[in-house]
Image (tube, grey):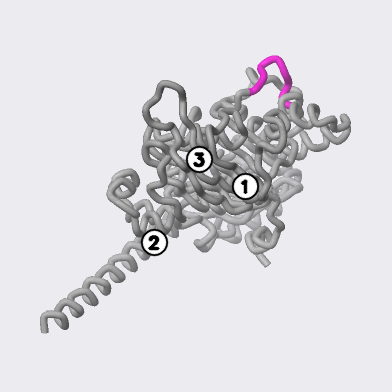
Amino acid sequence: MTQTDQAAERSISGAELRLENVVKRYPGQKSPAVESLSLTIPAGEIVAFVGPSGCGKTTSLKMINRLIEPTSGSILIDGEDIRKDSATSLRRKIGYVIQGGSLFPHMSVAANVAVVPKMLGWDKKRIATRTDELLDLVGLDPDRYRDRYPRELSGGQQQRVGVARGLAADPPVILMDEPFGAVDPITRQRLQDELISIQRELRKTIVCVTHDIDEAIKLGDRILILQEGANIAQYDTPDAILAAPANDFVADFVGAGSTLKQLSLARVRSLDLLHPTTAKVGEDTGPAVRRAEDAGDDAIVVLDDRDRPVAWPWLRQVRNNDKVKSSPRENLVTLDEAATLNDALDTMLTAAHSKVIVTGDRDRYLGVLDFETVTEHMRKTEREAAEHQLELQQEQDQQGAHADG
């Protein structure tokens, strides 16, 4: 059984989220910011809220944890109305991740992650264990990062800590408001991959507000496209929205090139990976180099004791040392198996190897993807789509001919 199959069998730790005729009116405004919003978000899924500026997506998100109080209607988590508890108590049960991580600058990384567990009265040992577990989960070595301060971190690292803090008390629902909007494109892609990997393991219910339809397509099990007043234009899977936009508004919002966007639905895990020579950190270089030479490889993928890739040196670099050496894991660019083929191409076009290392759960090494495999798959997909379109056209022509006859 593959890691993906095993992950699919894991129990869902998220909760069903239901909005029933939710309205938000502000004094002095003619129209409501949110007008009778009703939808159900299944437990364990990621739903992306997208729409034009001012459509009510962020207002809708903030009503779920009562940062904004609804004017009327009901919001239920696992069938229980969120107004059953105080707003403060509710927020301690819902993870909240915003742009930039929003870390407390005077607190260490560990203290930032521990904020909610400490409020909930967890003991110090439990908090310390949970903090280290979460830092590892988001790809930050606890020994290196737990005692650092936000000013010592990059933007991407701060956002990782923000995600860890949102997960700290193991909430069933996590809200994310433009979580990756303040980082560069490469870091953004890696953080998206990190979130997908975490979700594959934890199966939380995640609501993510984004202005980027491509990000929504990549992250969302479902996408909610909103018009002004948080009126639902379409609520469906990415495949269904791209294949059959509900109306002109959705078609315009998704934009031109929906065929190319459908290609971006294809994931790295659907392709065959290469398996070049690997070596463990600390291994003698002689046997590793001989294995690579026998296989015709010009580089070696270096793995740590947990089978996570940490370096990808050329053979000439390996030969300079007696032992296989490591490097900081975050310095190595990898792709999660759930990354899109567009991400794979973007990564490979700037990579020294013209290939990319693919990882699975907890960043474990799965193999290597090369440029030729991706481009051939995309060409095949385009050919199949064109053939399918031709068949549909021929059927329509035949039906039209019969009708005329």
Total count of labels:
3
Residue at far left of view: 405
Q: Are marks 2 and 1 in contact (CB under 8 Å)?
A: no
Closer-to-camera residue (260/46): 46
Q: Residues within 10 Å of mark 2 (few under 14, many from 20)?
A: few
Mark 1 secondary-structure assignment: strand
Q: Where residue 308 appears, x then y in whole percent? A: 68, 47
Look at 70% across and 41% down and name the residue there.
171
Look at 42% across and 36% down and name the residue there.
211
Look at 73% across and 36% down and name the residue there.
168
Query: On the image, numbered disc 1 is attached to which residue?
Result: 205
Closer-to-camera residue (329/173): 173
Q: Residues within 10 Å of mark 3 (few under 14, many from 20)?
A: many
Q: Residues within 10 Å of mark 1 (few under 14, many from 20)?
A: many
Q: Nearer the viewer, mark 2 or mark 1?
A: 1
Indicate the quadrant where residue 102 lies: top right
Indicate the quadrant where residue 86 lies: top right
Q: Is residue 106 visible?
A: yes
Query: On the image, numbered disc 3 is attached to which residue?
Result: 189
Mark 2 secondary-structure assignment: helix
Q: Earlier in the sequence, mark 2 or mark 1?
A: 1
Query: On the image, numbered disc 2 is attached to which residue?
Result: 376
Instruction: Give the residue type that dot 1 points to.
Output: Thr
Look at 45% across and 49% down and name the residue there.
217
> Please, is residue 383 above or below residue 123 in the view?
below
Q: Is residue 363 visible?
A: no
Q: Nearer the viewer, mark 3 or mark 1?
A: 1
Q: Are marks 3 and 2 in contact (CB under 8 Å)?
A: no
Instruction: Give the residue type that dot 2 points to.
Output: Glu
The residues colored magenta run 103-109
